[in-house]
Every structure is written in C-alpha cells, then in structure tokens.
Image (tube, grey):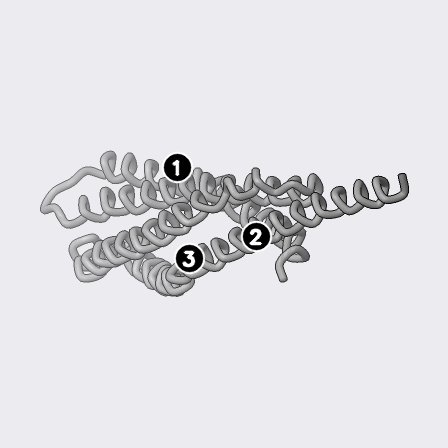
C-alpha cells in the first residue's frame, strides 16, 4: 500500500514537472519572439529623431510665411512642401517597422494558449491584449498624421499657384486645423497604449530567465 501511494505521488510529481518544463519552453519561445519584435522596432527611434527635426523646421518656415505676401515667400513655401515629402518618407519607414513588429508578434501570441500555469497564462494574455491595442492605436495615429501631411500639401501647394482666393485658403486652412485637432486623441491613445504595454511587460519579466 505504501509503495502504491509513493508511486502515485511520484507520477503526480512527474506530471507537474512536465507541465513546468512545457511552460518554460513556451515562455522561452515567447521571449525569443519579443527580442525579434524589439529589433523590428529599432528603426522607429531614428524616425522619431528625424520627425522632431522636420517638425521644428516646418514650424520655423510657417512662421516666416504667416502674414506675408505669398509671392515674396515662395522659397519658404517650396521648403515646406519639401518638408512634407520628407516627413511622408519617414512615416512610411515607421509603418514598415511596425508592420514587421506586428508580424513577429503574430508568430508568438498563440504560444500563450499553451502555457498551463493559470496565473502565468493570465499575465501573458494581458500582455498580448496590450500589444494588440498598441498596434491598433499606432495604426490610428499613422492614419491621422498622414491626413495632416496631406492637408499641409493641399494648403501649401495652393500657394504656389498664380491665382487664388482667400475663401479657398480659409477652407484649406480649416481642413488642416481640423485634422490637427483630431490628432490629439490619437496621440493620447497611442501614448497610453505604450504605457500599458510597459506595465504588462514588467509583470511578465519575472518569468524570463
């Protein structure tokens, strides 16, 4: 009888050990995927630096244009249009990097369903949800910023024409201002989603060896 009891305990212990080892394998695979995600997003840092520089340049140029006879500031207008094209290119680099990041995430997110420990699984699921939210809010952010760039091109390209009306300028200016206002909530949502990812990541860091 004692032997049978000892054997049953041994079997139970073996099952737990297998489950533990299985979780370790899934978590290691997940962590390897996170490294690839981080690598995929590295170009975004350089993009942000370029964008900040271009935004400051645009602000300086628009101040030089504001209130002036448009014919006397055509050089600045052309520089603004060049600036919008450069920001357009940088934005495409960011989209490419984030798309690659999301592709890597999709490869590992289902590993979480194979984790057997309920508490670990719950925390990884919450991290998955935070990541999915980040990709969604980033997509919204990019669409909003692209809209702003398009409205800027629409306005400043109008200034290059030989003729125009104040009414049309006002219409295009209002369209740009509206697009800029809409960006605030998109920026806030994306910023909050990044903070959420960072929080959930700190919760699962304890499981990475």
Across and down, in percent, residue 8 comes to 80, 40
Asked whether 83 or 61 is in front, the reply is 83
Identify the disc placed on residue 41. 3
Indicate which label's residue lies in the foreground, 2 or 1. Answer: 2
Across and down, in percent, residue 27 comes to 58, 51
Q: Specify the quadrant that holds the C terminus.
A: bottom right
Which residue bears the numbered disc 1?
178
Q: Residues within 10 Å of mark 3 (few under 14, many from 20)?
A: some
Asked whether 182 or 40 is in front, the reply is 40
Looking at the image, which residue is at 65% across and 41% down? 116
Against 5, residue 207 (above or below) is below
Looking at the image, which residue is at 38% across and 44% down? 142
Which residue bears the numbered disc 2?
25
Q: Circle 3 sits in a helix, a strand or a loop, which is it?
A: helix
Of callouts 3 and 1, the N-terminal one: 3
Across and down, in percent, residue 54 comes to 33, 61
């Amino acid at each position: 009888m004692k032997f049978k009891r000892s054997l049953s305990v041994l079997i139970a212990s073996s099952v737990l050990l297998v489950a533990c080892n299985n979780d370790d394998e899934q978590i290691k695979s997940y962590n390897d995927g996170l490294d690839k995600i981080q690598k995929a997003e590295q170009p975004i840092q350089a993009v942000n630096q370029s964008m900040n520089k271009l935004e400051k340049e645009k602000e300086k140029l628009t101040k030089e244009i504001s209130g002036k006879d448009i014919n006397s500031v055509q050089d600045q207008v052309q520089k603004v249009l060049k600036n919008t094209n450069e920001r357009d290119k940088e934005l495409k680099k960011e989209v490419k990097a984030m798309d690659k990041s999301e592709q890597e995430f999709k490869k590992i997110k289902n590993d979480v369903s194979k984790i057997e420990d309920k508490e670990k699984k719950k925390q990884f699921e919450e991290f998955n949800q935070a990541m999915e939210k980040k990709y969604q809010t980033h997509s919204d952010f990019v669409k909003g910023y692209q809209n702003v760039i398009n409205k800027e091109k629409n306005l400043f390209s109008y200034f290059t024409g030989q003729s125009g009306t104040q009414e049309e300028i006002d219409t295009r200016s209002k369209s740009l201002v509206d697009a800029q206002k809409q960006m605030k909530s998109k920026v806030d949502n994306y910023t909050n989603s990044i903070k959420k990812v960072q929080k959930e990541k700190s919760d699962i860091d304890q499981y990475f060896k």
